[in-house]
Image: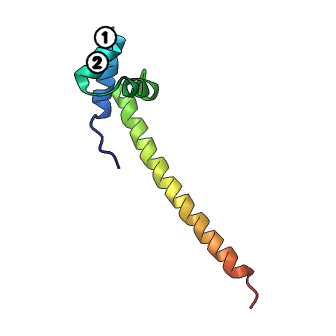
């Protein structure tokens, strides 16, 4: 898994610089990222406050946990269905 170099707070700070009029190419060079990364950040974090970004992160973590639980339950149900469908 890739290591994150920037926290949400830092990303929002960079986006605020962009909103204040700094050019994307200059910001990309200054922070060592590509322009495409800046636009991806803008798509994900554009218009957010730091508290919103923290809430988004917690919701994503909760969503991941729930998806894992659902996958486990579906696997278990599938195994039980297969076991019960066999003729003894």
Mark 2, residue position = 27
Vertical order, 8 against 79 (above or below): above
**Hey, which quadrant is residue 56 in on the image?**
top left
In the rendered view, does 35 fall on the left or right side of 73?
A: left
Q: Residue furthest right?
A: 87
**Hey, which quadrant is residue 35 in on the image?**
top left
- Please provide percent x and percent y for residue 30: 23, 20
Q: Residue at x 29, y 29 (%)?
A: 9
Vertical order, 20 against 64 (above or below): above
Vertical order, 84 against 60 (above or below): below
In the rendered view, does 14 fall on the left or right side of 73?
A: left
Q: Residue at x 30, y 22 (%)?
A: 28
**Nearer the observer, 51 or 39:** 39
Q: CA distance from mark 2 to mark 1?
A: 7 Å
In the structure shown, which secondary structural element does the residue marked by tag 2 occupy?
helix
Mark 1, residue position = 22
- Quarter of the image for the C terminus: give it: bottom right
Q: Residue at x 58, y 65 (%)?
A: 73
Q: Residue at x 71, y 81 (%)?
A: 84
Vertical order, 70 against 19 (above or below): below
**Hey, which quadrant is residue 44 in on the image?**
top left
Q: Residue furthest bottom?
A: 88
In the rendered view, does 36 fall on the left or right side of 9?
A: right
Q: Residue furthest left?
A: 30
Count neighbours of disc 1 (C-alpha within 10 A) and say few if under 14, some if 14 to 19, many if 20 or more: few
- Please provide percent x and percent y for residue 76: 59, 71
* Contact, mark 2 vs mark 1 (Cβ under 8 Å): yes
């Amino acid at each position: 898994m890739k290591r994150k170099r920037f926290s949400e707070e830092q990303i929002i700070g960079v986006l605020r610089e962009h909103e204040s009029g700094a050019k994307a190419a200059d910001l990309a060079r200054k922070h060592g990222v590509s322009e495409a990364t800046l636009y991806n950040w803008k798509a994900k974090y554009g218009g957010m406050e730091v508290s919103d970004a923290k809430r988004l992160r917690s919701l994503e973590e909760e969503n991941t946990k729930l998806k894992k639980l659902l996958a486990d339950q579906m696997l278990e149900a599938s195994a039980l269905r297969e076991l019960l469908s066999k003729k003894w």
